[in-house]
Image: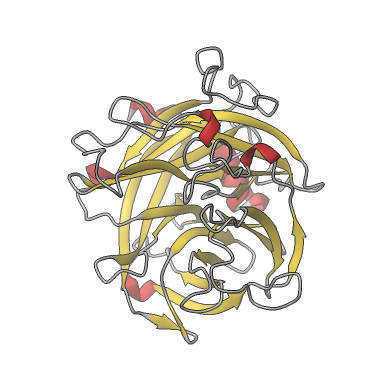
Amino acid sequence: MRNLAKVTIFIACILIAATVAIFVGMSAQSFAVTQIDLIGRAIFPTGSSFGGTEIGGLSGITYDSDKQVYYAISDDRSSKAPARFYSLKIDLQSGKLEKEQVTFTGVTTLLDENGKSFPELSLDPEGITFTGNSVFVSSEGDVDRKITPFIKEFSLDGKLLKTLPIPELFLPDDKGTRGIRNNLAFESLTLTPDRQYLFTATENALVQDGAVPSLQSGSPCRILRYDALSGNLERSFAYITEPLPPGANPVRKLTTNGLVDLLAIDENRLLSLERGFSWETGTVVKLFEISLEKGDRIEGIESLKNRLGEISPVEKRLLLDLETLKIPLDNIEGLTLGPVLGDGSIGLILVSDNNFSPLQETQILGFKIKVQKTS
């Protein structure tokens, strides 16, 4: 409970994001978290369908509070169906989450600059965040196919509106000495509640910045903060992931830990979601609070590899290790806040990417965050 109490300063901002009319003007020091509770989960087996598409690959989720609808991005690379995001209704007002309370209501195809669906294997959509009347989507690209990552804005009917610039140091070179690692790039995406700042981050270190996680140490990711209005990169920071899960065999393939999503509370404070996996440990998921306030700016640094001892990364504090929930966990990759519930708590939704594998499933986990006024 001590760790949870330390997120006090987050809470008014969270409440403002969920119900602006109720909480505008209240101090961020006026609330304290008293509890985070799992309220249920909905499971959709691989092969489930909606709107002529296979539901799966849900790698990010965001909430439209006006319409009370969630938008979830699929990381299908236009292989099983054109690249797309789903609209969902998730009813949390009973204080519980069961499959019957989750309804897929729409599917939207993403369109390229020519107004056509993206060609197969031309993108790897992973993150999504709602702007108020559109969504930003991030793609990891594909290093092996020399497809660059992107951050693009789309209308709610899928039309391309804007493409944000990606700094040169994130783009792989032909020698493999610079840029993102394959499938370890822009997994996360989030807007601040005032919609002024857009965040994304690499899942693991850029090639020139250092190594992927080991059993002894984490990987230095880069968090990018854009001015959402101009689309220009404003600042970037170093974020160190947790090491590989204890007991993992790092020699094996698919052994990993990385930063898979962010949830902005304001321009300097976020929640971060890390997901690790190994055949020995299974899936490990942890939720952190992070602060950028004491983190050094690194946008002008070409390589972090020999500078990590000089650079202060963002501060992070563990809020919840999902292993303590004692439930089977799949490949959790996305999170978003939901509505304020009847008892005054706030809904929190996590989603999993089933990789379209028959050995996995799509999980939607529901939580409620309880708070109390302290002064």
Q: Would residue 32 be seen by someone viewing this image from the given angle?
A: no
The answer to whether residue 139 is visible is yes
Q: Residue at x 56, y 77 (%)?
A: 82
Q: Report the side of 322 relative to 155 (left or right).
A: left
Q: The N terminus appears in which quarter of the rendering?
A: top left
For the point 53% across and 61% down, the residue is 124
**Closer to us: 313 or 309:** 309
Picture coordinates of residue 260, whole percent (x, y): 46, 47
Up the image or down, 313 lies above or below 86; here it is: above
**Left or right relative to 177: residue 351:** left
For residue 158, which quarter of the picture?
Answer: bottom right
Q: Which residue is drawn at 66% across and 54% down?
A: 151
How many numbered marks, from 0 up? 0
How is this picture coloured? secondary structure
Q: Is residue 70 left or right of residue 226?
A: left
Q: Quadrant of the C terminus?
A: top right
Q: Which residue lies furthest to the right in this view?
A: 230
The residue lying furthest to the top in this view is 310
Q: Where is residue 210 in the image (x, y as percent from the top left)?
A: 47, 29
In the depicted structure, whether residue 171 falls above or below residue 104? above
Is residue 45 placed above or below 316 in the rendered structure?
below
Q: Position of residue 263 (x, y in %)?
A: 54, 45
User: Quick check: 220 above or below 343?
Assistant: above
Residue that appears at 56% across and 72% down: 84
* Percent coordinates x, y for residue 130 in the rendering: 64, 58
Q: Which residue lies furthest to the bottom in this view?
A: 52
The part of the image, by quadrant, that contains residue 123 is bottom right
Nearest to the observer: residue 104 or residue 278: 278
